[in-house]
Amino acid sequence: MAGQGGVWGNLLAPLRLPERVLEALDELAELRAIRSELTRVREQTEPLSELLPALERLNEDLGTRLDALHETLAPVDERLATIERTTGELAGEIQALHETVRGVKEDIKRMSGLRGERGMAERARDRLVGGKD
């Protein structure tokens, strides 16, 4: 029987696929999977070629609008600078007015005796009519 297994083995040997052929078939199966995946990627990316010109037009349009916006805002920036400068000047003038009003208020208090002492007007009247001194 051992001889028969050897004979059968020898007779069936040409029908067995060599290792290299099996490895090649495995690689072929992998290549088919890769090819299928590449086909799907190509199908998905084909519309992108149409998108590029649309994106370029959109970019140009946005650039044009941005330039127009810049031209529109330049005078506004100048006006804002003028308003800021004028506001600063007005704040200075208001501060000076406040100081003047405080001074006048003090003068009125001093002359009318509102500070708790006899004012200059009262003292002058007293001297003229001969009252307290």
Image (cartoon, rainbow, N blue to C red):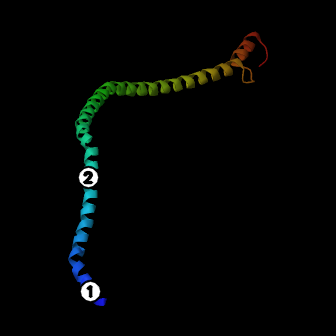
Judging by the rendered image, the residue that carries numbered circle 2 is 38
Callout 2: helix, strand or loop? helix
Residue 27 screen position, x and y as percent: 25, 65
Identified at 72% across, 11% down, the residue is: 128
Say the numbered circle drawn on residue 113. none
As drawn, is 44 to the left or to the right of 116?
left
Q: Which of the two residues, 81 or 120, is positioned nearer the viewer here? A: 81
Callout 1: helix, strand or loop? helix
Q: Which of the two residues, 23 or 54, is positioned nearer the viewer here? A: 23
- The residue type indicated by label 2 comes to Leu
Residue 26 screen position, x and y as percent: 27, 66
Kindly indicate whether the residue at mark 2 contacts the one at mark 1 (C-beta within 8 angstroms): no
Please rate how many residues cluster around mark 2, counting C-alpha atoms within 10 Å: few if below 14, some from 14 to 19, many from 20.
few
Judging by the rendered image, the residue that carries numbered circle 1 is 6
Q: Which of the two residues, 54 or 110, is positioned nearer the viewer here? A: 54
Of marks 1 and 2, which one's residue comes earlier in the chain?
Answer: 1
* The furthest residue to the left: 14
Identified at 25% across, 50% down, the residue is: 39
